[in-house]
Image (spheres, helix red, strand yellow):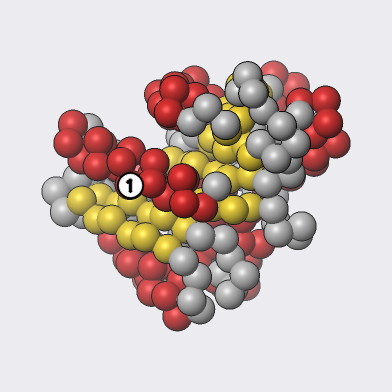
Amino acid sequence: MQSDKKFDIYLPANRTLATKTVILIHGGGWTSGSKADMNAFKLLITQQFSDIAVVNMNYRLANANNKPYPMQIEDITNLVAFLRENKTKYSISEDIGFIGISAGAHLSLLWSYAFDTNNKVDMVCSIVGPTNLTDPEYLNNTNPELQNLLDLFGIDPTTEFLEEVSPFHQVTATAPPTILFYGGKDPLIPISQGTDLRDKLQSVNVTHEFTLYDNAGHGWTGLELLDTWSKLNIFMETHL
């Protein structure tokens, strides 16, 4: 449906052709959710940064007949192309960053690592995002809810395909600065999804930060959320 592809763009008043854009990508297990879920981040960014444009996007949701990959990656590619084609109209640059949550974080990482052919991504943030579908914690899991999500990519897909859709396997030395946030008691995202990507980024000398909230699940509130925003704020100031 066309409505799935809608996005909102928030342009700062004093923007120029050097103004960078942050793209927000919502979660929902690739099958649900909407850009409205990212409104809090939109508000924080537009209030805190007077020189950054924000795009809050929808993407086509997966179902039994429509796999998340490559469909949702293509939606991001089309949005980035639209922004590039309209950069003069909007008075923005081609430089972008991503902030994604859960499935949206997976898509943010995967696009930044494997599909940023013009090297325009300056930073990417993953909050509880899946990073490696070949992780034994996933392949050998006994969680029906989790398995239903993994099955979206195809029943018994090949290892080669799982690597293709896994940011962990797409990292290279040219990957953009990456900031990661994970919960130590997340029922859907094993800690290894965060720590393994952290170690991979370290091994190829990509600038990165990693935070694990030991007692948090698939998201958090209160002081931990304040800590997340504080660290993300500084990271954006530094790299975007």
Whole-percent x, y for residue 221 in the image: 22, 32
Q: Amino acid at mark 1?
A: Lys
Q: Quadrant of the rendered structure where residue 211 is? A: bottom left
Q: Residue at x 49, y 24 (%)?
A: 46
Residue 233 in sight from this viewpoint:
yes
Whole-percent x, y for residue 74 in the image: 73, 44
10 Å neighbourhood of mark 1: few (<14), some, or many (≥20)? some
Q: Is residue 167 left or right of residue 145?
A: right
Q: Say which of 130 and 86 sits in front.
A: 86
Q: Say which of 213 and 48 sits in front.
A: 48
Whole-percent x, y for residue 84 in the image: 80, 39
Residue position marked by numbered label 1 in the rendering: 231
Q: Residue at x 71, y 32 (%)?
A: 16
Residue positioned most to the bottom: 203
Q: Is residue 4 left or right of residue 106?
A: right
Q: Vertical placement of 107 versus 37: above or below?
A: below
Q: Is residue 184 left or right of residue 196?
A: left
Q: Vertical placement of 27 versus 126: above or below?
A: above
